[in-house]
Image (tube, grey):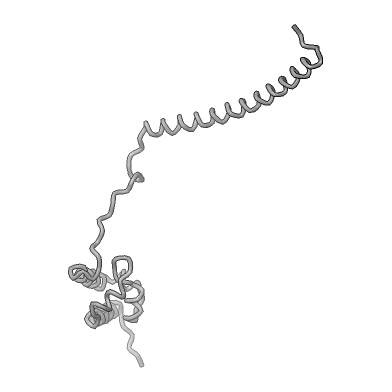
Amino acid sequence: MQKRLNGQQRADENLATFLSWAASKTDADYREMALRGQLNRKEIARECGFAKSVLLQNPRVKEALRKVEAELRERDILPPVAEPTAPTRPNEAPNPRAAADKARLKRLEVENASLRAEVMELRGQLERYRLMDNVLSSTGRLPR
């Protein structure tokens, strides 16, 4: 009959499993396991025989993984960590001038569309009057 482990014992066992797994890997193994600048968590969990959440939630395993990745970066097996760039706009205070410009642009676009529609209507009327002018001048009924 298998003995049931409490949470702390399971955490200790997972840490030991991870450490022995890490010690058994070669640089070539780590290179094959690299994914987007870090080790593939899913593959690590599968090879160690525990859930991927262990790598995220067990603080000692998480720290051990961080150390392994740091050592691999020092040996140029993993690429260096990229510095996060500042967000372009989301957390900045709203700019009142930009908001006013945006509202003005919207108003001008609506006005422009309205004027274009009016121009098209007037061109249609002008064409109709040109046709009437041609008919009247050709029949000799042009008013003076």
The quarter of the rendered structure image containing the N terminus is: bottom left
Q: Residue 102 appears in which quarter of the rendering?
A: top left
The quarter of the rendered structure image containing the C terminus is: top right
Residue 12 visible somewhere in the drawing: no
Determine the residue located farthest toward the bottom in the rendered image.
1
Which residue occupies the foreground of this view, 12 or 61? 61
Q: Position of residue 93 (x, y in %)?
A: 33, 39
Which residue occupies the foreground of this view, 51 or 46? 46
Q: Residue 6 appears in which quarter of the rendering?
A: bottom left
Depicted 131 relative to depicted 36: above or below: above
Depicted 96 relative to depicted 68: above or below: above
- In the displayed structure image, the side of residue 116 where residue 78 appears, left or right: left
Q: Position of residue 94 (x, y in %)?
A: 36, 37
Which residue occupies the foreground of this view, 52 or 73? 73
Q: Position of residue 143 (x, y in %)?
A: 76, 9
Depicted 10 relative to depicted 113: above or below: below
Q: Residue 63 appears in which quarter of the rendering?
A: bottom left
**Residue at point 36% right, 73% down?**
42
Residue 21 visible somewhere in the drawing: yes
- In the displayed structure image, the side of residue 143 where residue 29 appears, left or right: left
Q: How many marks on residues?
A: 0
**Residue at point 77% right, 11% down?**
142
Q: Position of residue 53 (x, y in %)?
A: 35, 71
Which residue occupies the foreground of this view, 125 or 138? 138
